[in-house]
Amino acid sequence: MRLQRLTEYLLRHRWQAIILTFIITYIPVIGMASILIACLVTLCVGVVEGAMFTLAATLPYVLVFASGTREAIPMVVWATVTLTVLGNVLTWVFAVMLRRHCSWSFILQVAALTGVLAISVIHLAYPGIGDWWAAQLQSFYNQSAALAGAAQGETLPAIGESQVDTINIIKNFATGILAVFVLFTAVIQVMVARWWQITVSHTGRLGRELQGIHLSRLAGGLFMLALVLYYLENSVVLDILPVLCLLFSAAGLSLVHYIFGLMEPSKGRFWLSLLYIALMYSLTMIAMLPLFSALNLILPVVIAVMILSASIFAFVVLGLFDVWFNMRKRIRKV
């Protein structure tokens, strides 16, 4: 009921809502809701109104550039602001597509195509992007090791051979991983806004929409070609692969939701909960990789990587099978 009243206020009082969106962007954590408001307005009211709210949700980040000098602001802050602005714009674009009745399958494929094109342009403009990432990752590791050492009251050893090997692997996929983060965040924000819209309007079911994600055979063929080029160690394809894996993982996860939806409700919820707990554990451990590596606690990260890798592999395989065989027509009951 409170969500209903809040939604009615945001949709009926445009200028007050725009000012509210602008102000809450400055509030840590809560500020993330500003782009959700912009996305909701785009879905419920219109493209122009949504663009105005998106501008209000993005302008505070832009002001960071205008109010400071590059030397005074750490690079990580500049990168965060840039990615946030880009993510907000993509969120609005995807919301516009959804408002114009584009399917989730189409939106995800457009998102993946956007990521592929962006990564290709970056590699053309900066052929040595991998070496730059290696330097940034090494600096990040050294800072994490220094913080961990300070917490333990001792000086941890400098970067070792195993850490160097890890950095040399990650640098090949770093741009792609960053693109995955931006695209994933934008799509999730649109999904949350769509859930918000459905909750207050009681029209449709988000779960049913997301269970129907099915990719085109063109996407499947391009992914198979990318796998061939991956084994030929093409540097651009190495960076593109995380984006393609995200796309087909989303399709595979959608199929998993469909299959679990055919089960008894209690069983389906149990297996889905177990799946998401495992995924959240894996992502949390991997995000803390530099800290665990500095503390020589490798086992939790290894387990997390194994769980995440197996899950992504299974989702991708399911997504590929669904492209060619349309598994929903073959699976009717579990």
Image (tube, rainbow, N blue to C red):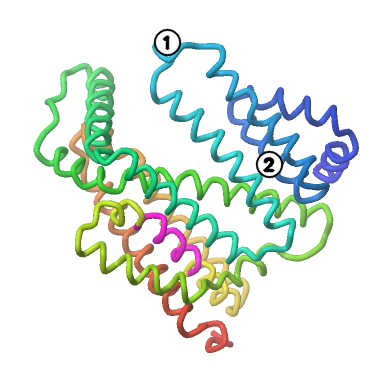
Q: Helix, strand or loop at disc 1? A: loop
Magenta stretch mostly in which secondary structure?
Answer: helix
Residue at the spot of label 1: 72
Q: Amino acid at mark 1?
A: Ala
| Disc nearest the viewer among 1 and 2 | 1
- The quadrant in which residue 293 appears is top left
Residue 268: image location, x then y, percent: 56, 71
- For the record, the magenta segment spans 241-251
- Label of residue 36 in the image: 2
Q: Are marks 1 and 2 in contact (CB under 8 Å)?
A: no
| Residue at 60%, 39% in the rendered image | 88
Between residues 193 and 324, which one lies in front from this camera angle? 324
Instruction: Give the secondary structure at mark 2.
Output: helix
Residue 96 horizontal/vertical position (percent): 70, 51
Tell me: 45 left or right of 294.
right
> Quadrant of residue 167 in the image?
top left
Q: Position of residue 291 (x, y in %)?
A: 28, 33
- The local crowd at label 2, few if under 14, some if 14 to 19, many if 20 or more residues have their Cα within 10 Å, is many
2 over 321 or under it: above or below:
above
In the image, is residue 330 part of the stretch drawn in magenta?
no
CA–CA distance in space, label 1 to label 2: 31 Å
Residue at (39% x, 69% y) in the render = 222
Q: Position of residue 67 (x, y in %)?
A: 56, 12
Residue lying farthest right? 12
Amino acid at the residue labelled 2? Leu
Q: Earlier in the sequence, mark 1 or mark 2?
A: 2
